[in-house]
């Protein structure tokens, strides 16, 4: 497992998160995309993984409702995948949420995102629903995980 430094990103680091995002996702997004997502959200937590001071991944969440934290978006650069970095980011987010007494963490992914589906199941998430996403013309898989009695 690659050891990385996990930090909480401040507003200045949103530029780096947007740059990482644009290396892995389409359509491209600017800093405003992330800022708009955080508007009106409680307990936003943007995490960044640094390897030798270089940002190589991010993991973003916020409160969905009282007691439920939501993992919204995350990714690791392709050349750093399968080295345990996403797991470290996910564990940092879960520890943060558990310390703030959230009971569950929820996440979603498109049905075609098989790597993340496997990741979520291996990380102990349960599939708790499916819904149609007309924007992407795909099923969205909904996962939840209890943060009670968890050991990292």
Image (spheres, grey):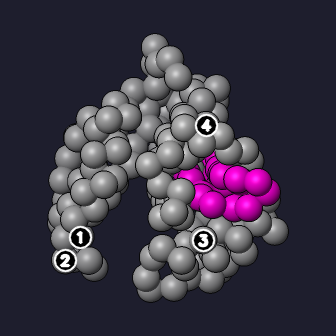
Q: Quadrant of residue 122?
A: top left
Q: Tell me if residue 36 can be seen.
A: no
| Quadrant placement of the N terminus | top right
Crowding at dot 3, Cα within 10 Å, few <14 / some 14-19 / many 20+, comes out as many
The answer to whether mark 1 and mark 3 are in CB contact below 8 A is no
Q: Label 2, label 4: how many angstroms apart (C-alpha)?
A: 32 Å
According to the picture, the residue beneath numbered tag 4 turns out to be: 92
Q: Secondary structure at mark 2?
A: loop
The answer to whether mark 3 and mark 4 are in CB contact below 8 A is no
Please state the extent of the stretch shown in magenta in the rendering: 41-61
Choose between 142 and 50: the one closer to the eye: 50
Mark closest to the chain's N terminus, 3 or 4: 3
According to the picture, the residue beneath numbered tag 2 turns out to be: 137
Residue 133: numbered disc: 1
Disc number lying in front (2 or 4): 4
Q: Tell me if residue 13 can be seen.
A: yes
According to the picture, the residue beneath numbered tag 3 turns out to be: 20
Disc number lying in front (1 or 3): 3
Task: Answer above or below: position of 87 versus 136.
Answer: above
Q: Label 2, label 1: how many angstroms apart (C-alpha)?
A: 6 Å
What percent of the width, then of the height, locates residue 90?
A: 52, 41
Relative side of 61 to 8, left or right:
left
Q: Secondary structure at mark 4?
A: helix
User: For the point 71% across and 71% down, which residue is it?
Assistant: 16
Q: Quadrant of residue 109?
A: bottom left
Mark closest to the chain's N terminus, 4 or 1: 4
Relative side of 120 to 58, left or right:
left
User: For the point 44% across and 85% down, which residue is it?
Assistant: 27
Q: Label 3, label 2: how many angstroms apart (C-alpha)?
A: 25 Å
Relative side of 20 to 14, left or right:
left
Choose between 80 and 97: the one closer to the eye: 80
């Amino acid at each position: 497992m690659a050891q990385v430094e996990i930090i909480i990103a401040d507003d200045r680091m949103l530029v780096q998160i947007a740059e990482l995002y644009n290396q892995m996702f389409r359509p491209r997004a600017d800093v405003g995309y992330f800022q708009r997502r955080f508007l009106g959200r409680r307990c936003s937590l943007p995490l960044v993984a640094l390897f030798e001071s270089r940002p190589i991944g991010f993991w973003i969440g916020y409160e969905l409702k009282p007691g439920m934290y939501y993992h919204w978006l995350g990714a690791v650069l392709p050349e750093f995948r399968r080295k345990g970095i996403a797991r470290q980011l996910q564990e940092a987010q879960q520890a943060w949420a558990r310390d703030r007494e959230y009971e569950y963490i929820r996440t979603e992914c498109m049905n075609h995102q098989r790597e993340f589906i496997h990741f979520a199941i291996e990380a102990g998430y349960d599939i708790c629903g499916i819904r149609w996403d007309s924007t992407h013309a795909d099923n969205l898989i909904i996962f939840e995980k209890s943060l009670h009695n968890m050991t990292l």
